[in-house]
Image: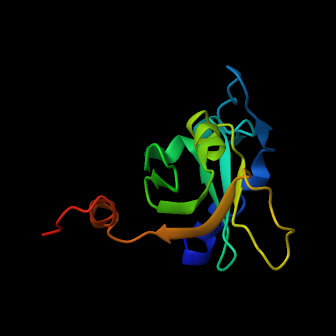
């Protein structure tokens, strides 16, 4: 059997049986491919984080490990996910904190003073959004003012 012939069985694997959507307790029959559209591995939904510069990030609440914040002022919130730490700085962040804590906030968008009208004095204002993806444990320690060895 040539190398090309041995690959043919893998190329045609998806064509042998149609995809079956699996939900609840229903399971595919032997040999059928399964696709779950319910997002059960993303319990709690998604959080869309939109800084002014750079790419936006769609993060799963199920990956959220910890929330750090400066009580009672709430001028910053740090969301620590498995592979990224997001620092949100702003004013009047109480409602945002409560929404993230309850996994109800769907979008966090940085305020753009050039495109958006002046907000009310008590409005939630996100002034900056920063992502840290490398050396997460060191980033968390530095954020807390701890010495990194």
Q: On the rendered structure, is 37 left or right of 49?
A: right
Residue drawn 76% across and 49% down?
A: 16
> How many numbered circles are shown?
0
Asked whether 30 or 21 is in front, the reply is 21
User: Residue drawn 50% across and 46% down?
Assistant: 63
The C terminus: image quadrant: bottom left
Residue 26 vs residue 71: left or right?
A: right
Picture quadrant where residue 17 is located: top right
| For residue 5, side relative to residue 22 (left or right) | left
Of residues 25 and 137, the one nearer the viewer is: 137
- Give me the residue at 71% from left, 38% from top: 36
Q: Residue furthest front?
A: 121
- In the figure, 136 relative to 44: above or below? below
Judge left or right: residue 72 versus residue 117: left
> Closest to the observer: 145 or 46?
145
Colouring scheme applied when the structure was drawn: rainbow
Residue at (77%, 75%) from the top-left corner? 113
- Towards the viewer: 87 or 40: 87
Q: Is residue 20 above or below residue 4?
A: above
Q: Position of residue 116 (x, y in %)?
A: 85, 70
């Amino acid at each position: 059997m040539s190398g090309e012939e041995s690959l043919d069985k893998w190329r045609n694997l998806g064509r042998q049986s149609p995809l079956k959507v699996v939900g609840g307790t229903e399971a595919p029959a032997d040999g059928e491919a399964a696709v779950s559209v319910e997002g059960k591995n993303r319990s709690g939904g998604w959080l869309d984080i939109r800084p002014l510069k750079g790419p936006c990030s769609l993060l799963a609440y199920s990956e959220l490990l910890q929330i750090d914040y400066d009580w009672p002022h709430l001028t910053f919130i740090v969301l620590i996910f498995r592979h990224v730490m997001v620092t949100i700085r702003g004013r009047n962040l109480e409602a945002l904190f409560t929404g993230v804590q309850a996994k109800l906030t769907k979008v966090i968008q940085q305020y753009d003073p050039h495109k958006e009208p002046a907000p009310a004095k008590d409005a939630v204002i996100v002034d900056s959004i920063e992502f840290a993806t490398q050396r997460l444990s060191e980033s968390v320690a530095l954020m807390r003012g701890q010495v990194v060895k």
